Image: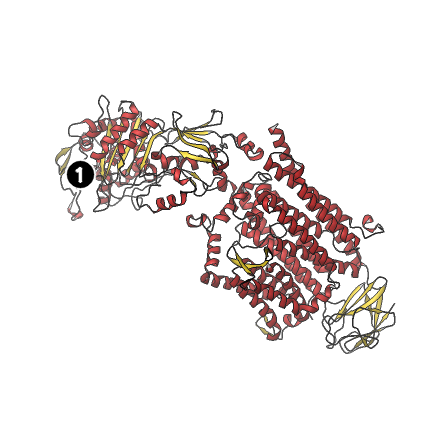
Amino acid sequence: MIAARARVPIGRARFSELSLLVWVGILAVLGFVAVVGAETSSFGVASIIVPAVFIVLVLSLHVFLVARRFRGDQVLMPIAAGLTAIGLVLVQRLASDLLLQQLSWTIIAGGAFAATILIPRDLTALARFKWTWAFLGVLLLVAPLFPVIGREINGARIWIKVGPGSIEPWEAVKLLLVIFFAAYLEEYREVLAHSPRRIGPFPVPPVPYLVPIVAMWGIAMLVMVFEKDIGATALFFGIFLAMLFLATGEAFYAVLGLALLLVGGFVAYQLFGHVQARVDTWLRPFDEDLRFGTGYQLVQGLYALANGGLFGAGLGNGMPERIPVVWSDFVFDAFAEETGFAGALALLALYLLFLYRGMLIALRAPTTFLQLLAAGLSFIIALQTLVIVGGNARLIPLTGITLPFVAYGGSSLVTNWMLVALLLRVSEVSNRMRGGP
Amino acid sequence: MEITFGVLLWGVRIAFLVVLYLFLIRAFSALQHSLGAETQVAARPAGLAFLVVQRSVRGAPRVGDRLPLRALNAIGRDAGNDVVINDEAASARHALVEFADGEWWVQDAGSTNGTLVNGATVRSRERLQYGDELGIGRVALRLEQ
Amino acid sequence: MTAPIAANIRSLTLTLAAAFLVTSVGVSYWTIIAADELANDPFNPRLIAASNDRPRGAILDRNGAPLATSEKGANGFVRSYKDQSLAQVVGYASLRFGLSGVEAAYAESLIGRDPADPISIWRARYLGERQAVGSVVLAIDEKIQKAATDALGGRRGAIVALDPRTGAILASVSFPSYDPNQIVDPQRQQAAMDQLNKAVDRPLLNRTAQGLYPPGSTFKVVTAAAALESGFDPTRKLRVDDPYQPDRSWGDYFVRSASHAHGLFDMSDGLRLSENIYFAQVGLQIGGAKLAEYAKRFGVGATPKLDLPAAKGQLSDSGVIERPTLVADTSYGQGELLVSPLQMALVYATIANGGVMPTPHYATEVRDAGGHVVRQIAPGAQGPVISPGTAKALATMLVGAVAGPGAFAFGAKIPSVDVAGKTGTAENRPGEAPHGWFVGFAPAAAPTVVVAVIVENAAEGGVTAAPMGAQVMRAALGK
């Protein structure tokens, strides 16, 4: 408290953030030393170049916030940085040839974070352009289906070509979607929650108010079916349900939605080969016909988990590289193999802490729009984590969702850091307006 | 010397896990700490200033009521607002009144019928002086100390 | 009026927190509770990988001759298998197809993590010391193995030889076989495995322990043992008239004699001339319950305690024998009986071992990198099945079954050695030639080797199998 109140002539001190970032730095260095040490059987200075670059990056973001006299939350950014550090350690461990790429994306993500802190001067103004966001979201969703710019990777057509690489527009869509829903629901939540007509205990909202939401959702579902990405569809649906529930408090919407999801899932199981394969793989990955086919990746992941035990095989000492595409789909299992249940639990706890902090920001947010926005954004991170970790641990069918901040992949890293910036902005509005740290 | 390296490497691995947990604990306690500070602020009684009802309709606050203000106040028909104006002509979230940099400010929150200050429609974020009259729907409120 | 959003945020957060809890429990299941089972799964590459970037321990025969070794190739270490006749026993260690045979059963020992050596396990796990791999020594004797392979001569079937005193398996041939070197060769493995999986004669099956056949006349010793222990007088002569049925209620169901015999038989005659009608009558006299009890004591219908996968077979479809016709047919080894050659060898090993059944095992030792024995594999005997007296009486009669006048198993004779044994001709599906059996041991007075031979669809049945048994026993006895 005393430290936080100390007068600093330039900027506004953020001591909690700084001290947490020091821990992140130590974590990054230790991780790299362990992984590179195990690989080369020696401790070399070269191993700390990447963590050093990373530390410089997060410290400059910190200095940037201090210089801006930024009054937002001080915990979220270090948690995101810690997770990103773990991600870099794992890329070095699992696919060191992709490390430079991931480091570049981390720097771009840092830039995107700073830009998001700076650019929307008035956060509440975002709500006014809700139809723009909806339109942009749909456009981005549909983009991969167009012949020239769309690309199909690993059976899912969810990528668009940009220069030499490709990006996943879905990642940006999830942010746009939350902004749109937050704005739309702020306006109409009362109508939706207190409709005059009820069938039994269930509210039946006036049709015109539901149309835009259902249409948005329908477009998303259709596109996802054509783009063959079950995970993104599930996430989409989850965001839709969560936002509807947050705005109206009607558990009925959530229950109805989940029922629809199950029915839809069942129909999809009957109709689409790729859905059927996913579910079969989940139910019986060890069966002879699957363990070397579609179940191979999952079974290898489970072997990795089993090798982890309580305290892990030690960083660089396991064999997670046996899992195909481990660096994007199975980073959680890889981390759990080398740091054990202890490490996996700490990782999950970090996400839980992120969720907790994000939801507290939502609770304190001064307007309904900001509340819905912060809660929706925090929800994305939590749901993504649950869906991919659940898939990795065979609790639910495996999907191609990325583990936020940790999994290899540029689009997801950039958007997730923008998401952090948005949450920080919301907390800043509360702090500035209500007073406080 | 092989063993020495192996033991050292193992030390680094253990340290990684320990630091991971220390970071987690620090992050958690930092969160609790800031939470404490926030609650303290939130617990401060409202009453920086008041909006005094000048003109009203049935169901809305009565004329002469002194509505206390915090640093930030959402005004509208919805119960989630800091200042609730139960008038059909008011929007669910109508306007925001905040105290920042030592002064009072008002901005419209996308209301249907607009927000007025001394009879003029609020276009952007505008300064409020003590004694100014704020129009929300059919209700008029005066900012007083 | 709408309730504040705060309550909704709280319930959503609580729901998600609960989901996090469930997820953590799920992760703890795989990392801790199911960890052991998965760690020892034969397809876990952590058990196999040593074959690729580090050498994998060698598999040796009892005299130290290599059966499987790791050799340095262009892309790391390659597993090399020396003896195709042991393919199903030694198995393979393939990154693509996992582990089988001894490679699977002793997977941890072969990567230097034998369960009997916790310090090595710890060092390997936490210090990454995995170069130090030991070896697994089998009881297989290359010389006997070769004799068995030659004896079978490329016919479909199996031969197993074991030491009745210890249960150590000295030879184990199962034909058709395959080349495990193809299974570990990245270029050829998929084609080879596809072909093996498609092959109708199932080369991947270890017929010695996993092949199931009707035992035919070799099973008559079990009926004899049950009878002797129930107080049946072996010298009492029974009337045999082909075809046989005890009463008219059997309708047109008869027990047939292989030699269309008519006359008086005692037990010794019954075994020597392999008389079905004699044993059908014995079985009916002692009753199905007694017969079933002894069959079970001899291990019929139970999985043998083997260090490799083994089939359990069956006494009958229902597990009991009550119907008189089924009692009669089971008594001479037909009915619904199914046994593996190993199970039959264990029946005879029990007789050879004074009534005590040994526990069969392929491996005898696990050694560390320095050649020191880390673990002795010497499972104790499984306990008495029949009395020493019964065993002695049966052994004497089995010597007669090989060397007596007109004995069916004459082909198993070895000069200057008393061989005890029994042939069998197992009827199977109509229209298919019967399987030929021989099971026996030598020297009869103090047996050191038991052999079981099965030749699938052998036209002459036991006559084909008996000389093969003799050939293997001669190799084992050095004659």
- Mark 1 residue type: Ile
Q: Is residue C393 left or right of residue C137?
A: left
Is residue A204 visible to us here?
no
Q: Is residue C368 left or right of residue B83?
A: left
**Location of residue A94 with respect to A141 vertically, above or below:** above
Is residue A196 visible to us here?
yes
Expressed as whole percent of the image width and height from the top left, the position of residue A216 reads 59, 68
Q: Kindly identify which residue carries mark 1.
A: C277
Give the residue at the far top of this rendering: C416
Which residue is depicted at the point 71% across and 52% down? A77
Which residue is depicted at the point 71% across and 60% down? A363
Q: Nearer the viewer, residue A398 or A405?
A: A405
- What secondary structure is found at the residue carrying circle 1? helix
Q: Which image quadrant for residue B63? A: bottom right
**Location of residue C55 with respect to C24 vertically, above or below:** above
**Location of residue A212 with respect to A315 vertically, above or below:** below
Chain letter of mark 1 equals C
Which residue is depicted at the point 62% across and 65% down? A137
Disc 1: CA contacts within 10 A as few (<14), some (14-19) or many (>=20)? many
Q: Nearer the viewer, residue A230 or A363?
A: A230
Which quadrant, please, contains the C terminus of chain A?
bottom right
Expressed as whole percent of the image width and height from the top left, the position of residue B108 reads 76, 71
Q: Which image quadrant for residue A309? A: top right
Give the residue at the far left of this rendering: C262
Mark count: 1
Q: Is residue C430 left or right of residue A91?
A: left
